[in-house]
Amino acid sequence: MTQLSLTLTNEPWHYPPEEKVKSISILIPVFNEEKTLVTVLEMVSKADTLGLEKELIIVDDGSTDGTREIMAKLDPSLYNAKIYYHEKNQGKGAALRTAQGYATGDLIMIQDADLEYDPKEYPELLRPIIEGKADVVYGSRLCGGKPTRAFKILHLFGNKFLSLVTNILFNATLTDMETCYKVFKKDIFKKVTIKCDRFDFEPEITAKVLKQKVRLIELPISYYGRDYEEGKKITWKDGIWAIMALVRFRFSD
């Protein structure tokens, strides 16, 4: 009879590291962000990505305020950036679809061009994937522990309701499906064919990722949300489209 021996040590157990994670593509859709764009790009370029080589994929979605003129004057080499333009506004989902096609990093992350999210929190979001603990990481504005500007009550209820619908349809426990900060392994994100052009791309991506049975975790993040007077663009109509997208992509691709 073969005998098995087990040696116990006091050394902590570690997840095996992700051997091939060497780079990250940060996708930045832009629409009418002349007041914040340069500041965001500087913050992202300085952000700690835990040693990963960083590329920025910036897509202007038909801005009309002066954003395009600012982008035309940018030196892409300063940010290791690739810059693309839509001739007319198509929506955030369409901008990300364009960016997705040019991303080459081992990890893919989404970053808005406003100042609602803080790139200083990149290390916390990247570490679980680099350490082999997750395939996808969502930064949640609603699970507590970080500074959060007060939501308008309808926005708060809307976000919670959309996350609830997501959890019921996909047997998940997300607190913030609509968050901007999402980090994916490249092979997972590349399997997602983005069909939605507007803000309903958020539930579409989440639905298609959850259907891949990935290891998805949420971590708390800071949030400094804007009001409509400051440039916020999402409306209650986008909430209706989001519900329709969740139901649609639960039963189809």
Image: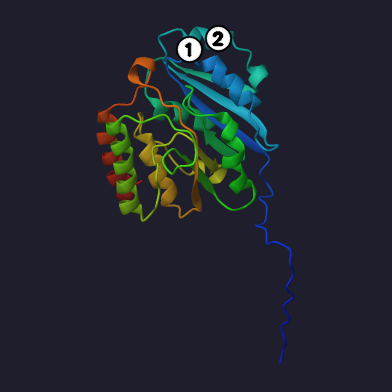
User: How many circles with numbers are drawn on the protein?
Assistant: 2
Q: Residue at x 43, y 39 (%)?
A: 193
Q: Measuring from the top left, give residue 105's x and y in whole percent.
A: 61, 36
Is there CB contact under 8 Å for labels 1 and 2? no
The residues bearing labels 1 and 2 have C-alpha atoms spaced at a distance of: 15 Å
Nearer to the camera, 157 or 52: 157
Q: Residue at x 46, y 55 (%)?
A: 213
Q: Amino acid at mark 2?
A: Ala
Q: Earlier in the sequence, mark 1 or mark 2?
A: 1
Going by the image, does 35 lie left or right of 156?
Answer: right
| 183 vs 47: above or below | below
Q: Dot 2 lies on which element?
A: helix
Q: Residue at x 43, y 36 (%)?
A: 179
Q: Which mark is residue 35?
A: 1
Nearer to the camera, 34 or 247: 34
Q: Measuring from the top left, give residue 117's x and y in whole percent.
A: 49, 29
Q: Look at the image and name its color scheme.
A: rainbow
Note whether residue 195 is visible: no
Q: Dot 1 lies on which element?
A: loop
Task: Name the residue that disc number 2 marks.
Answer: 72
Is label 1 or label 2 in front? 1
User: Which quadrant of the structure image shows residue 121?
Assistant: top right
Nearer to the camera, 206 or 227: 227
Quarter of the image with the N terminus is: bottom right
Q: Residues within 10 Å of mark 2 (few under 14, many from 20)?
A: few
Q: Amino acid at mark 1?
A: Lys
| 24 vs 213: above or below | above
Q: Measuring from the top left, give residue 202's x and y in whole percent.
A: 39, 37
Note whether residue 70 is visible: yes
Q: Residue at x 37, y 24 (%)?
A: 91
